[in-house]
């Protein structure tokens, strides 16, 4: 965590590419779009409004699916195909990366090492974008054996094989907690966070602003829960699925390109993410902690206690704290957080960017954190 988080989103349909639409993306706090084809009029607008594009079609595509494609990348996409596709490519300042695939099996990771090197040589300065499975595979209710998709016996092995073979500076994965479980999401974050810290990689997380069920809409607090727990685990980029139709229901824009209720929710939460991450600028992320209700965490020279469970990101001279008591947004509460220190000066900032909390003469700083809300604690 070195400052402002980069925020992305998947998919921009053709009926959402007017100048007003592109300005709305920037106003929503979105820094890049994944999956745009090479529409150069739209890319001109992206450049005007400071939005990056990770484009499809610059190289052959790939998807691991339910495991039916496992181990077939080399045969299906030999390296000469990448040269052929790249010959059709025309660069643009708004293009920051090229999609190389989604959810590959670990059986294809050794060949992906060659693919990534090839893509780097063909597109200097562009991000070769690759995204991995969640810990549940494609979907939480998928009946295909997970090992068939992952290519390994466990998810931990899948992650380690990626880090062993794939020469990228980051690890990106998707996990949709409201199509699975919030508990599984936090565990997935923990596994990847610890692996990225061990191997010195950035962590990128793809999460959901849309719904797998048409009758459900992701709430504002559910957006906060996803984003803030990811930041507490050290995420460097978060990407929302989906801005326009890509999969599932209730996107940020509807099928006619009009804003849904998700737009204002996402704009608000993205703003909170950027304000809080700015407070952490220049600080190294050290470790993520999960703190149970009533448990005390001693870290960075202070002790943190709460009447609710917390996700706590430990940094150099700061803490990122998220209340994780109500991830389903069924019974939100105002939770009391206490920071105790006999020597350090403590300043607490709310998601609004304003200083909050009260200091007592006994070395305690007390503040209120709403369910799924977050705060940054600066420690001197």
Image (cartoon, rainbow, N blue to C red):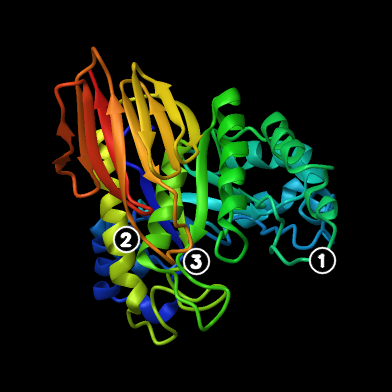
Q: Position of residue 376 (x, y in %)?
A: 28, 36
Q: Residues within 10 Å of mark 3 (few under 14, many from 20)?
A: some
Q: Which residue does the numbered mark 3 point to in the structure image?
A: 37
Q: Which residue does the numbered mark 2 point to in the structure image?
A: 46
User: Could you say which is closer to the camera, residue 224 or residue 277?
Assistant: 224
Q: Residues within 10 Å of mark 1 (few under 14, many from 20)?
A: few
Q: Position of residue 127 (x, y in %)?
A: 50, 43
| Left or right of 302 on screen, residue 367 | left
Work out how far the residue at label 2 is from the one at label 1, CA to CA, in angstroms.
41 Å
Picture quarter containing residue 240? bottom left
SS of the residue under disc 2: helix
Question: In the orientation shown, which residue stands out farthest toward the bottom?
Answer: 256
SS of the residue under disc 3: loop
User: Could you say which is closer to the camera, residue 84 or residue 179?
Assistant: 179
Vertical arrangement, residue 27 with respect to residue 228, above or below? below
Earlier residue among tags 2 and 3: 3
SS of the residue under disc 1: loop
Picture quarter containing residue 329? bottom left
């Amino acid at each position: 965590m070195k400052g402002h988080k980069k925020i992305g989103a998947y998919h921009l349909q053709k009926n959402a590419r007017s100048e007003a639409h592109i300005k709305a993306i920037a106003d929503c706090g979105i820094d890049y779009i994944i999956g745009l084809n090479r529409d150069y009029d739209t890319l001109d607008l992206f450049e005007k409004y400071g939005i990056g594009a990770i484009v499809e079609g610059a190289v052959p595509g790939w998807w691991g699916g339910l495991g039916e494609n496992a181990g077939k990348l080399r045969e299906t996409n030999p390296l000469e195909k990448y040269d052929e596709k790249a010959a059709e490519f025309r660069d643009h300042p708004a293009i920051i990366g090229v999609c190389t695939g989604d959810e590959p099996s670990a059986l294809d990771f050794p060949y992906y090492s060659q693919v990534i090197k090839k893509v780097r040589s063909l597109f200097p300065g562009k991000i070769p974008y690759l995204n991995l499975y969640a810990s549940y595979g494609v979907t939480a209710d998928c009946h295909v054996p997970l090992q068939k998709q992952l290519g390994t016996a466990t998810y931990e092995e899948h992650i380690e094989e990626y880090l062993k073979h794939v020469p990228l500076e980051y690890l990106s994965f998707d996990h949709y907690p409201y199509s699975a479980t919030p508990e599984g999401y936090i565990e997935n974050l923990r596994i990847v966070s610890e692996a990225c810290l061990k191997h010195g990689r950035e962590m990128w997380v793809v999460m959901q602003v849309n719904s797998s069920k048409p009758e459900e809409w992701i709430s504002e607090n559910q957006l906060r829960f996803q984003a803030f727990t990811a930041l507490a685990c050290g995420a460097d980029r978060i990407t929302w699925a989906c801005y326009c139709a890509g999969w599932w229901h209730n996107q940020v824009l509807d099928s006619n390109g009009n804003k849904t209720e998700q737009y204002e929710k996402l704009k608000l939460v993205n703003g909170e993410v950027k304000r809080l991450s700015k407070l952490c600028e220049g600080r190294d992320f050290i470790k993520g902690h999960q703190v149970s209700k009533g448990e005390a965490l001693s870290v960075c020279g202070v002790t943190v206690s709460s009447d609710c469970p917390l996700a706590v990101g430990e940094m150099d001279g700061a803490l990122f704290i998220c209340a994780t008591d109500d991830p389903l947004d069924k019974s939100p509460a105002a939770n009391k957080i206490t920071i105790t220190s006999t020597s350090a000066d403590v300043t607490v900032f709310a998601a609004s960017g304003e200083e909050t909390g009260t200091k007592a003469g006994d070395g305690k700083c007390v503040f209120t954190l709403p369910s799924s809300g977050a705060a940054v604690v600066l420690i001197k």
